[in-house]
Structures are given as C-alpha cells and as structure tokens.
Amino acid sequence: MAKKVMIMDTILRDAHQSHAATRMRTEQMLPVLDALDEVGYYSLEGWGGATFDTCMRFLNEDPWERLRTLRKHLKKTPIQMLLRGQNLLGYRNYADDLVDKLVEKCFENGIGVIRVFDALNDPRNLEASMKAIRKYGDELHATDPTRGICEAAISYTSGPVYTMEYFVNLAKTYESMGADNICIKDMANLLLPFDAYELVKAMKAALRPETKLHLHTHNTTGTGDMVNLMAIMAGVDIVDTALSPLGNGTSQPATEPLVATLKGTEYDTGIDLEKLIPIAAHFKKVAAELEKEGSLNPKVRQVDVNTLIYQVPGGMLSNLMNQLKKAGKEDKLQEVLAEVPNVRRDCGYPPLVTPSSQIVGTQAVMNVVMGERYKMVTKETRDLFAGKYGRVPMPINEEVAEKVLKGEPRITHRPADDLEPEYEKLKAEVIAKGYYTQEEDVLSYASFPEVAENFFKWRKARDKGVDVDQAKTGVYPV
Ligand SMILES: [Mn+2]
C-alpha cells in the first residue's frame, strides 16, 4: 500500500537558526512565501523561542507581526512552531495563566501546529501547555482540520536508561495526554539510522493508527539523510528537511535530495521538484547575504563527527572546550569527557539537551578542574538536584545530593505548582511603562523583559516619527 511521506520544511526557523544565528528577516522570506505555500508541505516551521528573541533583539521586528505576515501568505500550509513546554519561548518556568494566554495568542495570530517539548522529558512540564493547545486548538481544528494540532516531542538522547521501552512509554503517555502527533526530536543528531528504524517501528506499533509520527533530526554528524530514510522505511509519517541553501551540516538534511529519492516509490512525497528550484534559488541569495553580513559561517555546512566519537552533542563539546581553555586546562578534555557520564548518573540521567547539557558539562569541568568532585557547584546544578527543572528519569545519587544541596529543600511536585498567576501583573507593568499596544506585548515582555523593553522603546520612537536611527542609538549594539 502506498504511503505518502510528508515533509515539514524548516527553512523559516531551524534552518537559519542552525546556520545563521536565526538572523533571517521577514523581508527575506516574503518574496517566496506564496510559492512555498504551493509546494504541498505538511507544514512550514516558522516560529519559536529563538526567532522570537532575535526578531526583537537584533532585527527590530515584532515577532507577532512576522507571524501575522507569514499567515497572510501561507493560506494552505500550516505554520508550525516550537514551544519549550512550561518555559514557553523563554528560559524560566512560567505560571499556568501565562501558558494559557500565550497558546491562545499563538493560534490567534496564525500558528497551525504547536510542537511542544520538555528538556527533561517530564510529562508534568507539558501538562499546562498541552491542555491549552487542546483547548484553543480544538476550536481552530473545528473550522480547519489542518490546524490546531498538538505535537508532543520527545527529546532524544542516548544513555543506559534511554531504551526503546522508555521512548515508547513516553510516546504513549503524550498520546494519552492529547497529542495528535508524536515527534522524536533529535536536536543533536545523536540518533543513528538503524536505531531510528527500530524506534519508529516500535512507536508505530504502539501508538494509535491516527497518531502521526514526526521525526526531527539534523545533519551535523552526516547521518541525517540516512536517519530520515531508515525512519521512512520503518513507517514514519513526517520528516523535517531544509531547502538546500540552508540545509545539511548543523541544519536539517536538504529537502530536494529526499524528494528526488522518494519520487516514484511507495513513499513519494507528492512534491514536484521543479517547484522547489526557484524557491531554493531565492534562498541561495539570502544565504549569501547572511554570509556577507557575518551571520553565517560556512563552517556550519561541514560534517562534524565529534558527536559520534564522544557521545556528547556538538554544542556541548564546544562549550566544554571553551571552558577548559578559559581555565588554561585544555589538556584535561579526556578527563572531563570521562566525568560527564558520572555527573549524569549522579543527577539521574537527564537528557543531554539545553539546559541540562550545559549544567552537566559545566559540573564535569568543575569536578575535574577543582580536583575534587562537587567541591564547587553552580546554582543550576543545585536546582537540578533540588527538582526545580522537573523529574529526571532515574533516582539521583543521595550522597552527592547531600553534598550539593547542603540542606536546601527538594521538591517532588510539578515545579510550576509553586508559581502564582502572573499575566495581569505583567500587563500592569507594560501599561505603567507606557508600551502597551496589544495583549501580545505582555507576552513579549514576559519572555524577554529587557529585550522587549528595548524593542518597545524603539517602536515607540518609530511610531512617533522620531528618527529611527537616532532611536536605535545605544539601544541596539548590532
Ligand atoms: Mn532542531
């Protein structure tokens, strides 16, 4: 039986986040949005925490305005976004009322599919956002069956507790919490092709037939195309690719080769390669512009096999090397790499993704550099042991916990249960500062307070007819 494989193109989000520090501007997307809408993608990824931040911080753009512009042109293709669970678009835990409001506004401004994940894979950290996605998504879904979709993502990682059973059980948990799609989110390209085959087979067998399975990987280590192909042969429904000018390397495997590979097979994507040519030509020019302004370093296109060798994500490895360099202990890299699994075991085997990859990595460096384990600990390490990020998959090392926490209390409940409602309070602040123009401003301010305030200042100056370049001075260093 023919099984059409669907594609999400990441060209408007992860592709330029991975290759060009998220610096693609809306005006660089505009010329081809109508053509992208005609391709026949499952969805186009166009929004997330980094795009939100960068829009205001570096590009003088209102991220909400960008979303509305995208939606105006993408009439048929759903816009997909990435949400960091209870951390929303930022880096702290938000109260449930803010989670509810943000999800409502995302759908209202044009989002069709929300991919939501938690770095620790703690389902409790997805409870509030998935509830809100169901609440507002169901309303939207009733008017448009391609929109209002809840996609729960599993942070893929490797290590002794990350068995097939662990991933399948988590997928079933998310499905029972109301996910329409399950995503295997392999942000570090740790997933290997034959493991991908086994994992997809096992998940497809365990999930409901109507639940779509979506795979997200990168091509950092050069295995991305093989991972996608093996997953497709095992029955995955959707894979992520990026149009070739911003594809491969640290980004997603390129779109065109996969479309060509599957053409005429039982997995045909139905996408016409001819339609992609002029769009890719446009993004080739955009990539050249980004390279010229210094946002894109051509090195990101190369294969980096370090992750395959050291079993840590690429970003984490370069962090470790930087920290050792600063401490003048570059010769200690092998010791630190050997310490990483020990620290990870002590704190209950968190997945090695942001922020836990940085926490574990920094602690491993400290343990080695200080010559005594946990003599010095960061606040983040303490919070991780105290349960403030959520539940880790395995029990923590009690002896180490005692040394790290020094009597600080531990929580076992959902971290956001400790938070008071905050939307009205933040709204009052934005109004008092004189920046309020829309409810969305409160959400921008909640996500990145200083960045948003600087952006509001600039926007106010622009709208009042003040010289924009003058208004920018001292506000935007870039
Ligand atoms: Mn990614």
Image (cartoon, helix red, strand yellow):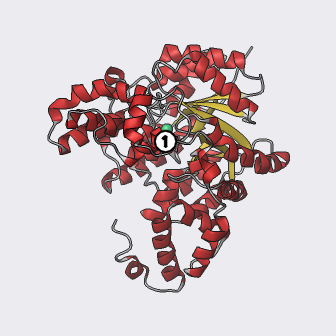
Q: Residue furthest bottom?
A: 465
Res 122 quadrant in image: top right
Q: Is mark 1 within 8 Å of ligand 1?
A: no
Query: Which residue bears the numbered disc 1?
Result: 386
For the N terminus, which image quadrant?
A: top right
Q: Is residue 113 left or right of residue 16?
A: right
Q: Position of residue 234 (x, y in %)?
A: 62, 15
Q: Is residue 346 left or right of residue 371?
A: right
Q: Which sits in the foreground, 338 or 223?
A: 338
For the C terminus, which image quadrant?
A: bottom left
Is any part of residue 291 visible from this angle? Answer: yes
Q: Which sits in the foreground, 142 or 358?
A: 358
Q: Residue furthest front?
A: 407
Res 64 quadrant in image: bottom right
Q: Position of residue 466 (x, y in %)?
A: 46, 86
Is 135 drawn above or below residue 353 in the view shown? below
Q: Is residue 274 left or right of residue 182?
A: left
Q: Residue furthest right?
A: 142
Is 45 drawn above or below residue 348 in the view shown? below
Q: Is residue 321 left or right of residue 231?
A: left
Tell me the kind of residue under disc 1. Answer: Ala
Q: Residue at x 61, y 31 (%)?
A: 183
Q: Position of residue 5 (x, y in %)?
A: 65, 26
Q: Position of residue 410 (x, y in %)?
A: 52, 42
Dot 1, crowdedness within 10 Å: few (<14), some or many (≥20)? many
Q: Residue at x 31, y 54 (%)?
A: 294
